Amino acid sequence: MEITKNSIIGDVLDKYPQTAPLFFSIGMHCLGCPASRGETIEEACMVHGADADELVKNLNDALK
């Protein structure tokens, strides 16, 4: 599964739980709450003031 800005955070975490620290590192500490599990990476980055493109790159790099 390639991670994109449109990937749902819950889906990413279910398939790749080892990516959680990357979300935590940009201030996404509520990964278990129901709302965040259904958000796209892009939506969550907008709320948290993070760069979605950078996070997606870092997530995909971590999976290589």
Image (cartoon, grey):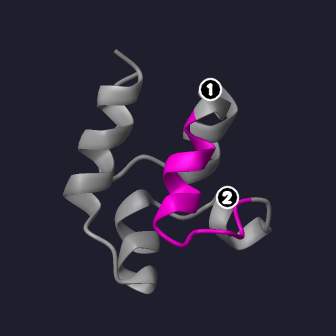
Above/below status of 47 relative to 57: below
Q: Quadrant of the C terminus?
A: top left
Residue 15 falls in image quadrant: top right
Q: Quadrant of residue 45?
A: bottom left
Q: Which residue is mark 1?
A: 15
Left or right of 51: which side holds 22? right
Name which residue type carries label 1: Lys
Q: Position of residue 59 (x, y in %)?
A: 38, 38
Asked whether residue 4 appears in the rendered view, the answer is no
Residue, x 78% and y 67% (percent of image)?
34
Where, quadrant-wise, is the N terminus in this rendering? top left
The image position of residue 54, as x and y in percent, is: 23, 54
Q: Disc 1 on helix, strand or loop? A: helix
Residue found 30% across the figure and 46% down from its top: 56
Position of 40 with respect to 5 (left or right) is right
**Which comes before the other along the chain, label 2 or label 1?**
1
**Residue drawn 49% across and 49% down?**
22
Q: Is residue 30 magenta?
A: yes
Q: Label 2, on which residue?
A: 37
Quadrant location of residue 11?
A: top right
Query: Where is residue 16 drawn, in percent x and y?
Result: 59, 28
